[in-house]
Amino acid sequence: MRRDFQQQLSTRLIRENQVICLETLAVKNMLKNHCLAKAIQDVGWSEFVRQLEYKAAWYGRTVVKIDRWTPSSKTCHCCGWKKEDLTLADRVFVCEDCGNVTDRDYNAACNILAAGRVASACGGVVRRGRVKAPHADAVEAGSPS
């Protein structure tokens, strides 16, 4: 049942999207949490990622993997402020800089998507630290200069 679900979901995701952005996870380390270990193993994350990758190659899509050390959960997706003291128990992200209040996982997903877009557009690898454009102009892209 799990394999069938993974096959259907991975096919749907690949058909509906040109780029899929994933965060590389240390599943082995996550299994050390005995409260979550069974649920993590039941998901079959590595098999799902493998299916996404080979189907992306078939359909001419792109899978971008974001480094697990990227502070996706700790960084505000609106303004870029970083909350250093965020714990796993904090399920809501509250930005002290811009006042944004959002679900922690949604905030992380927005940051992973943004980092994946940068990596996909620039052809680079996303690592720790801020990603800066090689040259920034005061004029917006697409506007007459």
Image (cartoon, helix red, strand yellow):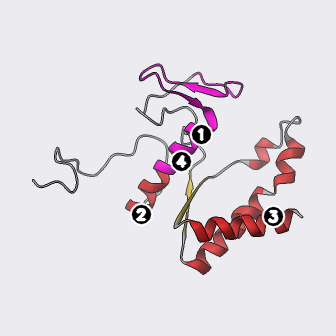
Q: Which residue is mark 3?
A: 5
Q: Is residue 68 above or below residue 45?
A: above
Mark pair 3, 1: CA separation: 23 Å
Distance from Cα at disc 2 to Cα at disc 3: 31 Å
Image quarter in which the N terminus is found? bottom right
**Spot occupied by residue 76 in the image (x, y as percentages of width and height):** 48, 32
Tell me the element at label 4: helix
Q: Secondary structure at mark 3?
A: helix
Q: Residue furthest left?
A: 145
- Residue at 41%, 41% (x, y): give it: 130
Label 4 is placed on what type of residue?
Ile
Query: How far is mark 3 from mark 4, CA to CA?
Result: 24 Å
Type of amino acid under label 2:
Gly
**In the rendered view, does 55 fall on the left or right side of 118?**
right
User: For numbered disc 2, what is the local secondary structure?
Assistant: loop
Q: Earlier in the sequence, mark 3 or mark 4?
A: 3
Q: Secondary structure at mark 1?
A: helix
Please tell me whether mark 2 or mark 1 is closer to you in this view.
Answer: 1
Q: Badge 2: few (under 14), some or many (20 or more) residues near its Cα, within 10 Å?
A: few
Per the image, the residue denoted by label 2 is 123
| Label of residue 106 in the image | 1
Range drawn in magenta: 85-114
Q: Which residue does the image show at 59% across and 39% down from the upper left? A: 106
Q: Amino acid at mark 3?
A: Phe
Identified at 78% across, 48% down, the residue is 28
Based on the picture, tell me whether residue 107 belongs to the magenta stretch.
yes
Q: CA distance from mark 4 to mark 1?
A: 10 Å
Residue 7 image position (x, y, % from top left): 77, 69
**Quadrant assignment, res 71:** top right
Which residue was labeled with disc 4? 112
First-in-chain label (3 vs 1): 3
